[in-house]
């Protein structure tokens, strides 16, 4: 029976990805019906991101009180309710209200699931699980496209995903005993990377969930937050502005640039599948460094002067391949850097810092590109990479 838990977790990661790209694919068909400008999708996106940040920061307390299984089931149920709410919304205000449980559900389940896998499974499963997230993120727009082209309308697209989430919620509720059984077979607790005395002015580590001040005072916590922040900046900025860079800086037609921009996501999804096998040979730190080297090579390919699209286009694939191992390997290495008893708290703030980077830094690049030019695109990404490399190397050094 316990062997059924891993497939359920795989399904949960697909479920995490399904709603993530729905708003972007549906919004061109939605905004006119609500009588709002097309730019208002950013308001909904920021509400979702805000809820995700809040719930990520509270994931340690929730998981300590309820356990990873219950947090996952409740969070998926909240997302399902929010999706069904989107499908019946008659005004933009209602969309904004339903976006609150949408974001709150996403953040806590993301942090809880990632920590659970980091504690109980090998690095290859972390890579393959995040590959499954890519499958879900790719399938979401296809489901919405099916609803739109079939004349069913965008509400049906949200409804279909909502029903899938409801089914997964029922599966998770039934599987709750399996999560407890797996906890009893947890891998041996390793010595924490830092001693309890290094958490200055706080309660004993075993007394319960840690406060934000306690987490920030753990040696290396700020470095891992910085590394995760920079990674999210690099990934989200690459994906959001790739098409615009190819159009305005490289001279491709918009429809051609849009299709080539998808190469980045292909690189990430395929790269995470391959990374799962590579982690059998290399440890997390080596995989992260390899990913950083590949990103650097991809950025050099983008920096080649205009007229050399033969290098710029595969450069996006190489950047995606480089991004592939970094996210799952940073998460998987968290218990080794900080100790299993602190990993949930640290992963929660890691996820929150990633969402802050995703929320703020791609729009900031948009302002720079608008006033200076899209030629800054690879340079902006290179700066994020350099800072990420520095933060990660400092993390490895201080928690060794």
Image: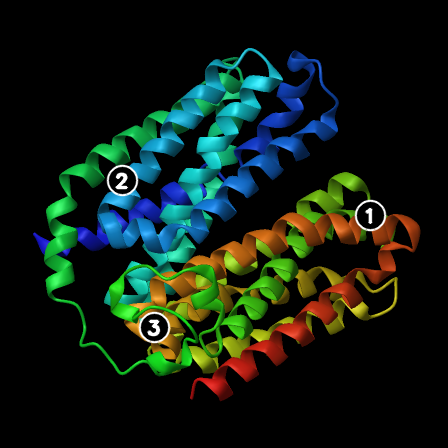
Q: Can residue 322 be seen by looking at this rendering?
A: no
List the residue tagged with mark 2: 73
Inter-mark Cα distance, 3 to 1: 43 Å
Pick whichever of labels 2 and 3 is earlier in the sequence.
2
Local secondary structure at mark 1: helix
Tell me which label, 1 or 2, sits earlier in the chain: 2
Colour mapping used in the image: rainbow
Query: Is residue 63 at least partly visible in the picture?
Result: yes
- Judging from the image, what secondary structure is the residue with disc 3 in? helix
Q: Dot 2: few (<14), some (14–19), or many (≥20) neighbours within 10 Å? A: many
Give the camera-side residue of 278 and 158: 158
Residue 335 circle label: 3
Report the mark closest to the observer, 3 or 1: 3
The residue identified by callout 1 is: 247
Residue 330 — which label? none
Q: Quadrant of residue 307?
A: bottom right
Q: Is residue 110 above or below residue 41?
A: below
Q: Nearer the viewer, residue 221 or 322?
A: 221
């Amino acid at each position: 029976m316990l062997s059924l838990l891993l497939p359920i977790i795989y399904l949960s990661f697909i479920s995490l990805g399904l709603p993530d790209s729905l708003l972007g694919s549906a919004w061109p068909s939605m905004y006119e019906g609500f009588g709002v400008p097309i730019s208002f999708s950013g308001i909904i996106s920021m509400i979702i991101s805000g809820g995700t940040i809040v719930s990520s920061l509270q994931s340690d307390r929730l998981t300590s009180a309820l356990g990873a299984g219950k947090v996952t089931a409740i969070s998926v149920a909240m997302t399902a309710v929010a999706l069904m709410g989107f499908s019946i919304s008659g005004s933009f205000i209602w969309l904004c209200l339903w976006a609150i449980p949408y974001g709150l559900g996403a953040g806590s389940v993301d942090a809880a699931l990632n920590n659970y896998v980091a504690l109980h499974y090998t690095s290859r499963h972390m890579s393959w699980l995040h590959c499954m997230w890519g499958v879900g993120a790719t399938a979401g727009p296809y489901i919405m496209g099916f609803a739109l082209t079939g004349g069913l309308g965008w509400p049906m697209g949200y409804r279909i995903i909502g029903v899938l989430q409801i089914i997964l919620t029922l599966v998770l509720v039934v599987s709750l005993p399996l999560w407890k059984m797996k906890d009893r077979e947890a891998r041996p607790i390793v010595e924490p990377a830092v001693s309890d005395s290094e958490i200055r002015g706080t309660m004993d580590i075993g007394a319960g969930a840690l406060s934000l001040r306690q987490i920030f005072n753990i040696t290396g916590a700020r470095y891992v937050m910085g590394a995760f922040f920079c990674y999210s900046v690099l990934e989200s900025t690459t994906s959001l502005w790739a098409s615009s860079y190819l159009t305005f800086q490289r001279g491709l037609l918009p429809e051609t640039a849009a299709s080539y921009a998808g190469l980045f996501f292909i690189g990430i999804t395929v790269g995470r599948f391959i990374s799962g096998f590579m982690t059998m040979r290399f440890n997390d730190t080596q995989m992260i460094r390899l990913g950083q080297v590949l990103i650097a090579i991809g950025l050099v390919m983008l920096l080649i002067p205009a007229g050399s699209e033969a290098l710029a286009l595969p450069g996006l694939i190489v950047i995606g391949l480089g991004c592939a191992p970094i996210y799952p390997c940073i998460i998987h290495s968290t218990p080794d850097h900080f100790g299993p008893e602190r990993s949930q708290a640290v992963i929660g703030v890691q996820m929150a810092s990633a969402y802050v980077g995703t929320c703020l830094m791609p729009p900031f690049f948009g302002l720079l590109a608008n006033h200076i030019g899209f030629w800054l695109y690879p340079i902006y990404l290179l700066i994020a990479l350099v800072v990420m490399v520095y933060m990660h190397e400092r993390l490895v050094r201080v928690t060794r």
